[in-house]
Image (cartoon, rainbow, N blue to C red):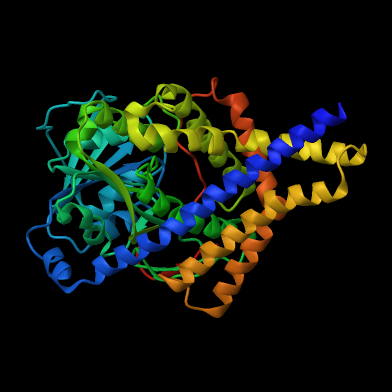
Amino acid sequence: MTELVQTTDLVILVYFLALNSFYALLLVLSVPEIWEQTRLAEDDDFQRLMQSDALPPITILVPAHNEQATIEASVTAILTLEYRNYEVVVVNDGSQDGTLEALRHAFDLYEVPRTYPETLPTRTLRALYRSRTRTRLLVIDKENGGKADSLNTAINASRFPLVIAVDADTLIEPDALLRLTRPFLLGREIAAVGGTVRVANGCVVEHGRVTDARVPRHFLPGVQVVEYLRAFLFGRLGWNRLGGNLIISGAFGLFRKDHLLAVGGYHSSSIVEDLDLVVRLHRYLRLRKIPYEISFIPDPVAWTEVPESARVLARQRERWHRGLIAAMWEYKGMLLNPRYGRVGLVAVPFYTFGEMLAPLVEVLGYVITVAGAAAGVVSTSFALLFMLVAWGYGMLLSLWAVVLEEVSFRRYRRLGDLARLVLFAMLENFGYRQRTVWWRLRAFFTVWRQRAVWGEMTRKGFEATGKQVAG
């Protein structure tokens, strides 16, 4: 028994060492990506091209369910983006609050007939509205069917070859679309591209724009700033070099419409529709040997509110992990399958054995290490080594994410904000990490019996005029 406990603990230790070392590899690979993307963004010839008629037209898809607090500011900001040719399709998904009334009042809506085919099946439409004051805007009112169903509804109504899915609580920076379309101007076969999502809590918002980026003072939203920096600045950037981005954020992702239609749009049965869609795109394009890239670029930025209560955050993280488990199970045929190239040989195995199984392995490691140390089976030095690898390595990566932010984009200009980022990165592993592990662990027991629902979250909202410091 002693040998079994020690061997198991050693295997778990090696697992965490390998997992965190892979994160470190992504960090290293992200550095040349940031340099290359920054060089392109600042190139004079490219800047002139981005201001020309060469830009492809875009349809912005905005699903909304009970978003009365933020819908006016969000849509207003979207309608004033720096881009020549785009339209906005807002889908009110059976909201039970005043979302539709807020839209009708803010944009002087009037009803119009439907003039497009319903290529993707969706729930019943109630009415379509145009705006008397904003010619780019189309509002669709429909029966409740979930976020995926709303996105499919918006895709049906879209007129342009590129579509971007944006959450209704998301504030997009004015030049974000110009930056997001950059890969399409380079002559590459782009299937989808994602931008950076940052935390708006604590920031000053004026007229639907983040005018002063601040790190929240409260711990829960503040530590999520570190998580988002880690996930976007080196997580997804590193995957560009490995050719296996499996996630384009549902809050800010640009896709070719013909590919979306070819794979059947978003799956309403999926718990996390953005992950499911990207994996299906990889599978579809690889099987048909269609050249493509699914990439991430860091400088287009959208801002979103994150949960400020543990109860809401727990639901969000459990839902995210349920979606990961369901997707990895549904597309298990891609696992270690050379037909899918680096996606099947690197990305899917990492998300399966790394991201998906990590909560199970970590809890097992805690139990064996603590119980073994108490029984004298596991030495104190080994127990400390385990905690150092499990926590200390992760803390070091979080601190490097803060450093990467500071030497590249520097959105947080104040010394106090930098100090809070460093503090949250150091405190993340003491209590918060264990809670997120528990929330993710619960997903293994609920994944097969819970239906897909909107991720409900109580929001403070953004004011359309004036300014607000939330969080």
- Is 307 displayed left or right of 177 in the figure? right
* Rendered location of residue 236, percent (x, y): 41, 50
Between residue 170 and residue 56, name the one nearer to us. 56
| Residue 112 occupies quadrant | top left
| Most distant residue in the left direction | 53
| Residue 141 occupies quadrant | top left
* Rendered location of residue 469, percent (x, y): 49, 68
Quadrant where the N terminus sits is top right
Quadrant where the C terminus sits is bottom right
Between residue 294 and residue 76, name the one nearer to us. 294
Inspect this view and state whether residue 143 appears: no
| Residue 77 occupies quadrant | bottom left
Tell me: residue 281, above or below residue 36.
Answer: above
Tell me: residue 337, above or below residue 101.
Answer: above
- Is 44 displayed left or right of 391 in the figure? left
* Rendered location of residue 43, percent (x, y): 20, 71
Q: Residue placed at 19% from the left, 44% from the top?
A: 189
Numbered disc total = 0
Q: Residue placed at 60% from the left, 70% from the top?
A: 420
Q: Residue placed at 55% from the left, 25% from the top?
A: 447
Between residue 18 and residue 402, name the one nearer to us. 18
Inspect this view and state whether residue 301 appears: yes
* Rendered location of residue 374, percent (x, y): 91, 40
Q: Residue placed at 49% from the left, 40% from the top?
A: 456
